Image (cartoon, helix red, strand yellow):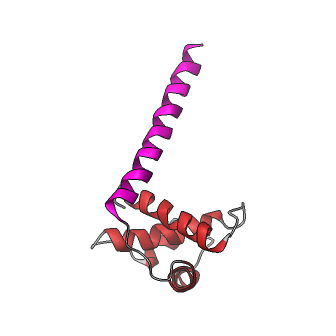
Amino acid sequence: MENEVPIIALIYIERILFKTGILVNKFNWKRILLVCMCVASKVWDDDSLENVHFPKVMSDVSLGMINQLEQILLDLFLEYDLVIKGSEYAKYYFVLRTLADEMRNQSLSNEEQ
């Protein structure tokens, strides 16, 4: 997967949460993340992974389930609103980058103690 895919998937996840009020929990987070990564990969990369590849990563999810989750995501949750503006992508990128830098700095300071 391209490096941009997880950021795009995060944007889709936030859209789902905002539109539906669904709570992410220990029972649904993997499937939500998986289907958002799958769709993000297809939107971003012309030579993206196909649905058949994902059950190899998550053995408890079948190809049929991934196809069904993708259809639900597109139809009901995102309503085929897949366009991400450059400014929206940049906002998420820099937030994640800042969090990663803060975690790295905290880890380094913990090692020094």
Give residue 20's position: percent from left, percent from top: 64, 74
Name which quarter of the figure residue 17 lies in: bottom right
Name which quarter of the figure residue 41 lies in: bottom left
Q: Is residue 79 above or below residue 41?
A: below
The outermost residue toward the left is 46
Quadrant location, the C terminus: top right
The reply to whether residue 58 is in sight is no
The reply to whether residue 83 is in sight is yes
Q: Residue 27 or 100: which is nearer the viewer? A: 100
Name which quarter of the figure residue 88 lies in: bottom left
Give residue 3's position: percent from left, percent from top: 36, 55
Q: Is residue 72 left or right of residue 39?
A: right
Q: Which residues fall within the magenta stretch?
A: 85-113
Q: Is residue 86 magenta?
A: yes
Q: Residue 63 or 3: which is nearer the viewer? A: 3
At x 43% / y 42%, what residue is drawn? 97
Q: Residue 110 or 75: which is nearer the viewer? A: 75
Give residue 89's position: percent from left, percent from top: 38, 57
Give residue 99's position: percent from left, percent from top: 50, 39
Q: Is residue 97 magenta?
A: yes
Total tally of numbered discs in the picture: 0
Give the prevailing secondary structure in the magenta stretch. Answer: helix
The outermost residue toward the front is 87
Quadrant location, the N terminus: bottom left
Q: Is residue 42 left or right of residue 14?
A: left
The outermost residue toward the top is 113
At x 47% / y 66%, what residue is drawn? 37
